[in-house]
Amino acid sequence: MSWWDTDDADDEPELDESSIRVRPNRKGNRPRTKTRPEHNDAETARVLAVDRGRYTVLLDEGTTAERRITASRASELRKQAVVNGDRVRVVGDLSGDEGSLARIVGIVERTTLLRRSADDTDEVERVIVANADQMLVVVAAADPEPRERLVDRYLIAALDAGIRPILCITKTDLADPADFLSNFAGLDLQVFTSATDRMPLTEITAALVGHDTVFVGHSGVGKSTLVNALVPSAQRATGHVNAVTGRGRHTSSSTVSYRAEGEGGTGWVIDTPGVRSFGLGHIDPANILRAFSDLAEVAENCPRGCTHLPDAPDCAIVEAVETGELGPTGPARLDSLQRLLATFMKPTQY
């Protein structure tokens, strides 16, 4: 008989489930789980504004039950950016009553995403707006002076995102925009011109109906003034251009959506803060040529792998400019294209 086969074994206590000792949860809450609820009862809303972790969203858009509610972002979305124009899934208190707070639990798949980076060497993208299908680029004919290179960058970002660009020239009572517009003569680009006492509000509103249009522009070009004229209830702050530096003062500090009413229906104006730079570090260089449709057509005759830079051998665009085939605006258009392409070829100022 072994030592454990003694009669003393009968004295061992019987063990059951109550004998298991469990360490108590110090936080006094339930243990976390990776299983997330499906939120089948969630409703879809449009994000109109973002302010310090609170989101203004529009529920039941276009119906008699339409209402604006305030929502926060669910913890499972903390690594995902929720931006203006997003369509989101919300749960919780959807009454819209004062003091109520809903919760964003999901983001509907986006159709477009407009982005920019801090500079051309920065691959970290900053999301500006989601689901816009048009971009209205606002630029002043003078005060501040128009910057065709910045407009080129807007066009590239728009086309890369699959957004149709439109151009509005303000302050045409101060200067003739003809020379500036000649830089874009080869593009299929709808252009509006606006003066202090003559704003084409009817024409612009007609172009906005049925679309989500993001407004972009350099500080001080009159973008907020234009938004207020199109949507009087917007009441966006307006500023002036510094007489010494020639730069505009940032007056819009956040991106906000407004509904624009027109004879043919409604559209959405998405006003963004003015910027003085627009980095393209996140964009594929192969897409840059798309912003220059007149040059892209000629580039079909370029050898494979052509960089279109000044030292590119047998570049059809360079040859077309040298022979005058692209007209008087050809050199300026090619220069703009080459400056943008060069930023991706080497980390230097071109």
Image (tube, rainbow, N blue to C red):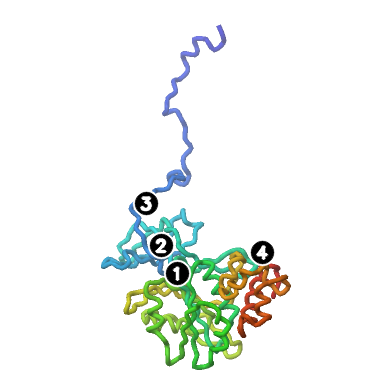
Mark number, residue 304: 4
Q: Upstream in the sequence, badge 4 or badge 3? A: 3
Q: Amino acid at mark 4?
A: Arg
Image position, residue 134 (x, y; %): 45, 72
Between the C-alphas of marks 1 and 4, the distance is 32 Å
**The residue tagged with tag 4: helix, strand or loop?**
loop
* Residue linked to disc 3: 39
Between the C-alphas of marks 3 and 1, the distance is 29 Å
Residue depth check, mark 4 versus mark 3: number of the one nearer the observer: 4
Q: Upstream in the sequence, badge 2 or badge 3? A: 3
96 displayed left or right of 250:
left
* Residue linked to disc 1: 133
Q: Which quadrant of the view contains residue 329?
A: bottom right
Q: Crowdedness of circle 4 by 10 Å Cα count: few (<14), some, many (20+)?
A: few
* Residue linked to disc 2: 87
Mark number, residue 264: none
Contact between labelled residues 1 and 3, with CB atoms less than 8 Å apart? no
Q: Crowdedness of circle 3 by 10 Å Cα count: few (<14), some, many (20+)?
A: few
Q: Which quadrant of the view contains residue 323?
A: bottom right
Between the C-alphas of marks 2 and 1, the distance is 14 Å
Q: Upstream in the sequence, badge 1 or badge 4? A: 1
Q: How many marks?
A: 4
**The residue tagged with tag 3: helix, strand or loop?**
loop
- In the image, 41 versus 168, the foreground residue is 168
Image position, residue 166 (x, y; %): 48, 77
- In the image, 157 versus 63, the foreground residue is 157
Contact between labelled residues 1 and 2, with CB atoms less than 8 Å apart? no
Q: Upstream in the sequence, badge 2 or badge 4? A: 2
Query: In the picture shown, does residue 114 fall above or below 151?
Result: above
Q: Crowdedness of circle 1 by 10 Å Cα count: few (<14), some, many (20+)?
A: many
